[in-house]
């Protein structure tokens, strides 16, 4: 059977190919894993970093025509028809068997093109984008945003949602078939090393946004005082100054290939989130901490507790600085427990949560959808 030809579309101008955000890492890992499993992948993106890395073997990167990163919502909406026509022509010429799209705000051209071509349209759902924008930013053109999100999810052949709350969200939006497909990790990036030497070190990796638990970490370190372990923060954002006030060493945003070494020098991985943080996250940092063999302290959210349990992590109420301080203090005083959690967490991702395994599962769904489309 010829190799599956998968077009992966990311129309979100805020997610750059080759960028340092978690969403960029996720996109890169998914297409790399699909190609490693034998698929030919055409990655179509609305934005690329200034100096992106070469694409993985089996992946071709192409720019989506039309408005880019600093364009207005009105400009992007006005470009929808042009983009749908371009996608139909480009995917037809390339011979795409399937269109795999990361859901983007104010974007529906992918679904229009896939329907016109008669190929399956699979939508990757990482957040309820309309709700998220209205809650944490400013939602422009709200009616258009809701209409396009509903049309994309309800019209998709399959929705792959990264957490159980997003499975429910997709169904509420009329999705016909939804499958839970959590995030994962590429093990080659994280060779299992012996526990780091030196003073006990806790690490947080990610953008320093309020909902990620910046204040939770800061309040825990204030409570720990002189007994607080070293704190390394791999990332940047609005919460940087708050964390620096409690002595955090903030590296700033790093390229994905630099993150494993930073994690390898730590002992405890933090993902505490905020008291009112959304329930739908499937944090990449969780999988990376586990793969690095760290003892994890994480918020008890569905996308976390579906992955780890008491044998593989310490779960705390989201945003609970007191519980975080107590968990960190206990782990700092107990190297044996840290090592046991690290071994168990690493074993969990090796067995269940690699991008290789996710890619095999995704391609199995693609094969089924393509066979049905060919039969029709």
Image: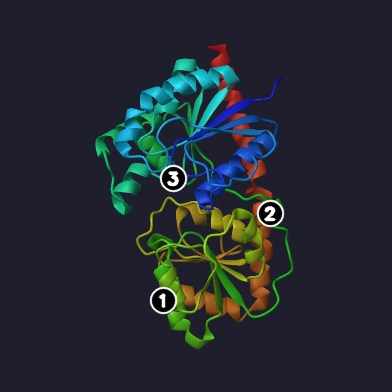
The residue pinned by badge 2 equals: 189
CA gap between label 2 and label 3 equals 25 Å
Work out whether 283 lies above or below 365: below
Whether residue 119 can be seen here: no
Residue drawn at (69%, 57%) of the image: 190
Left or right: 199 in relation to 245: right
In 3D space, how far apart are the residues under numbered discs 3 and 1 (Cα atoms)? Answer: 31 Å
Other-residue count near label 3 (Cα within 10 Å), few / some / many at <14 / 14–19 / ≥20: some
326, 83: nearer the viewer: 83
Disc 1: which residue: 219
Kindly indicate whether the residue at mark 1 contacts the one at mark 3 (C-beta within 8 angstroms): no
Residue tagged by mark 3? 14
Secondary structure under badge 1?
Answer: helix
Residue 261 image offset from top left, x and y in percent: 67, 63
Residue in the image at 63% along x and 70% along y: 266
Residue at the far top: name it: 376
Would you say 13 lies left or right of 294 here? left
> Which residue corresponds to the image point at 64% horizontal and 36% vertical from the top-left?
34
């Amino acid at each position: 059977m010829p190799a599956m030809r998968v077009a992966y579309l990311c129309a979100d101008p805020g997610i750059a190919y080759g960028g340092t955000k978690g969403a960029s890492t996720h996109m890169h890992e998914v297409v790399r894993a699909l190609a490693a499993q034998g698929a030919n992948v055409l990655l179509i993106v609305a934005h690329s970093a200034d100096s992106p890395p070469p694409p993985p073997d089996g992946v071709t990167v192409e720019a989506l025509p039309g408005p880019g990163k600093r364009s207005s919502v009105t400009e992007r909406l006005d470009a929808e028809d042009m983009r749908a026509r371009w996608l139909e022509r480009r995917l037809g010429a390339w011979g795409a068997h399937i269109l795999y799209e990361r859901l983007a705000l104010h974007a529906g051209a992918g679904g229009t093109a896939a329907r016109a071509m008669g190929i399956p349209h699979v939508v990757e759902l990482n957040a309820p984008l309309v709700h998220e924008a209205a809650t944490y930013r400013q939602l422009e053109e709200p009616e258009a945003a809701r209409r396009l999100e509903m049309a994309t999810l309800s019209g998709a052949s399959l929705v792959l949602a990264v957490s159980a709350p997003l499975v429910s969200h997709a169904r509420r939006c009329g999705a016909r078939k939804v499958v839970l497909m959590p995030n994962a990790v590429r093990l080659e990036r994280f060779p299992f090393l012996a526990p780091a030497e030196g003073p006990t070190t806790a690490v947080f990796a990610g953008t320093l946004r309020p909902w990620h638990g910046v204040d939770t970490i800061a309040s825990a370190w204030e409570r720990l005082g002189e007994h607080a372990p070293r704190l390394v923060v791999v990332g940047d954002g609005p919460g940087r100054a708050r964390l620096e006030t409690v002595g955090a060493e903030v590296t700033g945003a790093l390229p994905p290939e630099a993150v494993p070494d930073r994690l390898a020098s730590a002992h405890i991985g933090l993902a505490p989130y905020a008291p009112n943080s959304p329930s739908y996250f499937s944090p990449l940092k969780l999988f990376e901490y586990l793969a690095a063999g760290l003892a994890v302290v994480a918020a008890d959210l569905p996308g976390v507790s579906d992955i780890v349990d008491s044998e593989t992590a310490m779960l705390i109420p989201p945003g609970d600085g007191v519980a975080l301080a107590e968990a960190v203090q206990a782990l700092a005083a107990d190297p044996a427990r840290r090592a046991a959690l690290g071994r168990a967490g690493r074993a969990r991702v090796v067995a269940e949560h690699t991008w290789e395994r996710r890619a095999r599962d995704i391609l199995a769904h693609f094969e089924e959808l393509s066979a049905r489309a060919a039969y029709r």
